[in-house]
Amino acid sequence: MELHLNRVDYMQVGVTSQKTMRLLPALGKKAMQKVAVADHDGVLTCFGMKKGEPVPVFKTLPGQKLSRLDLGGAPGTAQEKIFVCSGSEVRGFTKKGKQFLTFEANLTESITAMRVSGADLFVCASYIYNHYCDCKDQNYFLSGDKINDITCVTSPHLPRPAPVLACQDRLLRVLQGSDLLYNVQLPGPPSVLELYNKDGGKSTPGESRCEDVLYGTADGKIGLLKIGETSAVSQWEIDNHKKKGGVRCIDTYDIIGDGVSDLLIGRDDGSVEVYGFDGSGEPTLRFEHMLSESVTSIQGGCVGKESYDEVITATYTGWVTGLTTEPQKAEAGPGDELRMSKETQTKVSALRLELEQLQGRVLQGRERYQQTAQSSTAVSAVPVFSINDKFTLCQDDASYSLTLEVQTPIDNLLLQSDVPIDLLDVDKNSAVVSFSECDSEQPNGNFLLATYRCQANTTRLELKVRSIEGQYGTLQAYITPRLQPKTCQLRRYPIKPLSLHQRTHSLQQDRPMNRLSLVGQFSLAEIHSWVVFCLPEVPEKPPVGDTVTLHFLNTFLGTQLEATYCKGEGHFRSDNISTISILSDVLSKEATQRKVNLNVSYDINDESVSHTLRMIHPQLEEQLLLAKKVQLIDALKELQVHEGTADFLIPEYRSILDQSQHLLDEYKKQPAHLERLYGMITDLYIDKFKFKGQNVKSKVSSLLEILDNYDLQSLLAFFSEA
């Protein structure tokens, strides 16, 4: 069934956080619903529609930033009480705006996730989960990594309601009371959780079955899990082959009208998706719409007009928008006159009047500012603006995605890096980039200075960079919006020594491994801080326990790393000698700076070198072939022009001509990819003999000659020479 939805903008509030907009329950079937939305100004707004216009039901006074919103109520009744959290405080409001609850959770950090279920309140700060019943403390849990979201399942398989925590280390943690029942490993860092069909699934008479949990990940994947007593089973998973944004919000609602709840998805690149379910129960994309900013909340319901279902979204800058099934356009045939209804005419007149008033206010404001700026007592105030930024490692292409979103249009962006990084092309990015010359030889010199000039009304910018492992420092972004007076905000992003590694929870045990061991007078907190400095996706606080074990996968090569450490001792195992070499250098430097004496020992496995070269081989062969084809394109095009046809060419060359644009695009997407592989092989060669006490830098030129005439067996033979 084809789905047609039309966009309607309802109102704009302040900047919003994830899951801060909900629809209040309808009084009857297909009846119009009210919308509650909370923003960073501390304002809770509830509005409904009357004669096509949003009418406020109530609005609270500004205050501290509101980070989450949920609905609750007594079991078996309409869930129409509104709960919001700001800092470590939770407040409750009736549907008419009367405040009936103020509860201080006494957390040392601000609440980042909240779930209300009857008399139970579940709240999470960065690493802490707390459960309260009737505002009395019940359960507590300290997570091993940052908590992004929470939901709560009830099932005949579970004796009591079980909270499910979505954690940054790619795990769902299912709890029972204050204890961990089990972990569920996911394909990416989970960013949002939601019960399927809002109650965990279709309930049958006499049975409560709230066990189906939907999840969305920061790298754009969606899946459904069936939560059991001792384990969880994956029902289905949607991969992110089209490289869309991360999932920020999920809801289920029958928007198609086939009697089956559809899946509503909001992403941080502005994409809104509707998935329907076929006969086999597999989700299928039925509708997609692109908004200009990230979607923070999504709900299915009926807001604009009675009997017309719609998808309601809230965006980062506070726009509450509907995608409605109500037709918004009327078409006239040849010679027909298109007549607007009185309601539409009133809307247009009101919009024109509002636009004129806004233009007048802007002119008055400019004149007032000019007069104030020219006076001798003028004081310039720096405008305050919010930035929503994300710097994440993408597993598919071993690059970092930097996303910047501002509540006002961006004028320009300056990128500065004190370490070598490559800027990759991003199709969604329409900004004009220019590069400045850098002098990297100077102390604290720059390796990159790039300026992005944005087009008008660009509020969101996405960039991609690729770093080199072993070279670490800081990437800085200077964001200048279109505001007067001119102002700029600085954001810093660390480029870590092993920046292309990501957390995983399983390693292949049959690989040849190298070992680095450290022994010294250091605490668990000290060595954990060194690991945080070296590797991404490591929690700032040490996990609970005397010994910590972390596993990592190199997203570029596929090599792996295991880190096991405790007070006074650390062991690192990897099938890549270069990883061990980088860790040895950086950890020794960190320990020296803190005046900690280390006893360092190595156990090097020569077989790991040939193993790593074989892992590099497919990429190297592919890049060499691509480079050769790209070099031939210009010559083949000249021959084609000279001869007037390409029929005389052999099939291989005709194929290169036919695919020339695709080949050039692929080559452009991966700048310096071949040089990067050459550099990794060179480092591997130097590191192998460094651990044997030999300096082989004089032989690097011979190695490069072999790479230019690449053959795997010749390369393996060169590495085996003493």
Image: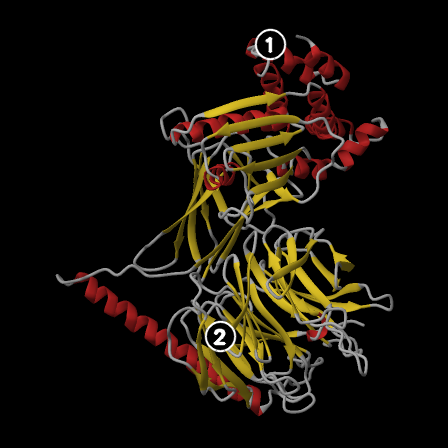
Q: Amino acid at mark 2?
A: Val
Secondary structure found at label 2: strand
Would you identify the image quadrant in which residue 501 lies?
Answer: top right
- Give the vertical position of 339 relative to 652 (above or below): below
Lateral position of residue 316 relative to residue 667, left or right: left
Identify the residue under disc 1.
699
Look at mark 2 in the image and give the residue it sits on.
84
Q: Quadrant of the N terminus?
A: bottom right
Residue at left offset 76%, top offset 33%: 657
Q: Secondary structure at mark 1?
A: helix
Q: Estimate the x, y position of residue 595 in percent, counting from the top left.
A: 38, 29
- The quarter holding residue 409 reads bottom left
Between 18 and 10, the residue placed more toward the observer is 18
Residue at 57 percent of width and 41 percent of height: 547
Give the residue type at disc 1: Lys
How far from the left and from the top, in percent, is residue 268? 58, 59
Residue beneath the point at 50% across and 63% down: 112
Say left or right for 140 vs 475. Answer: right
Is residue 635 visible to the viewer in this orientation of the structure?
Answer: no
Above or below: residue 426 compared with residue 228 = above
Horizontal side of 368 relative to 24 (left or right) equals left
In which quarter of the view is residue 107 placed?
A: bottom left
Tell me: residue 545, above or below residue 107.
Answer: above
The answer to whether residue 126 of the structure is visible from this angle is yes
The single residue placed furthest to the left in the displayed view is 376
Q: Closer to the N terminus: mark 2 or mark 1?
A: 2
